[in-house]
Amino acid sequence: MDNLKTPVLIAPSLMAANMLHLLDEVQAVEAAGADWLHLDIMDGHFVPNLTFGPDIIHQLRPVCSLPFDVHLMVESVELCIGLYHKAGADHITIHAEATADLRHYLGVIKKLGCKAGVSINPGTSVDAIMSVLDLVDLVLVMSVNPGFYGQSFIPSSLNKVVTLAEARKERNLNFHIVVDGGVNSVNAPSLISAGADVLVAGNSVFKQPDYSLAIQKLKQG
């Protein structure tokens, strides 16, 4: 993917939204120009927090036309993939750290008709996923330790983006490079220049007074 030709996509993370007004928040970011809706699924085991279940996604699906970008931060990958596909996920991303059979489960996601993604935590090397880059539609680089929104961006994440962009070009592949965690209008330009083409944004959208302006600032880099 060439960022000179392909504008960066913005995926607001619903984890940072006002949960008392979830429907309003979803419709507001869609109207503001969001490209995807990012949904962090946390099980309290793989990460020390709990978020959405499939029922919430199922209920949101009819009222939002954005692609649902479901990020599974769970131990039981084998149990969750089918549930979230059925609930309405368009993309399903699983963690390299969550399964020893990564290639198999990425194949399962693709067979269901979803876009397949793989994610790595800050402490995991890009080398851990090099063997599956031919299978994936997106690679999600965690730029904070997963589990809670509002953390500061880990600068070394930028090196992972560069490495992935080089591998994508060398192998003539076409996966998205997604960055999730501490993304804002200050670090967005460096991430885009490094090769990221999807930015997951929590506080940098949902905690701003004007969602449309916040999304445009991120897109402009």
Image (cartoon, rainbow, N blue to C red):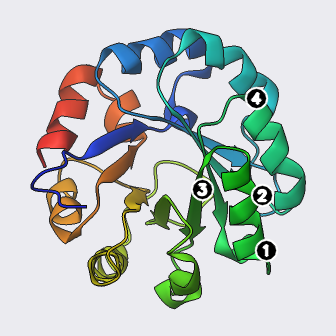
Labels 1 and 3: the sequence-earlier one = 1
Q: Which residue is mark 2?
A: 74
Callout 4 amino acid: Ala
Alpha-carbon neighbours of circle 3 within 10 Å: few (<14), some, or many (≥20)?
many
Q: CA distance from mark 4 to mark 2?
A: 16 Å
Circles 2 and 1: CB atoms closer than 8 Å: no
Callout 3 amino acid: Ala
Q: CA distance from mark 2 to mark 1?
A: 10 Å
Query: Is the residue 85 above or below the residue 78 in the image?
Result: above
Q: Is residue 113 visible?
A: yes
- Quadrant location of the N terminus? bottom left
Tell which tag, 3 or 2, sits nearer the viewer: 3
Labels 2 and 1: the sequence-earlier one = 2
Query: Who's the residue at 46% across and 57% down the image?
Result: 151
Q: Secondary structure at mark 4?
A: helix
Q: Which residue is mark 1?
A: 99
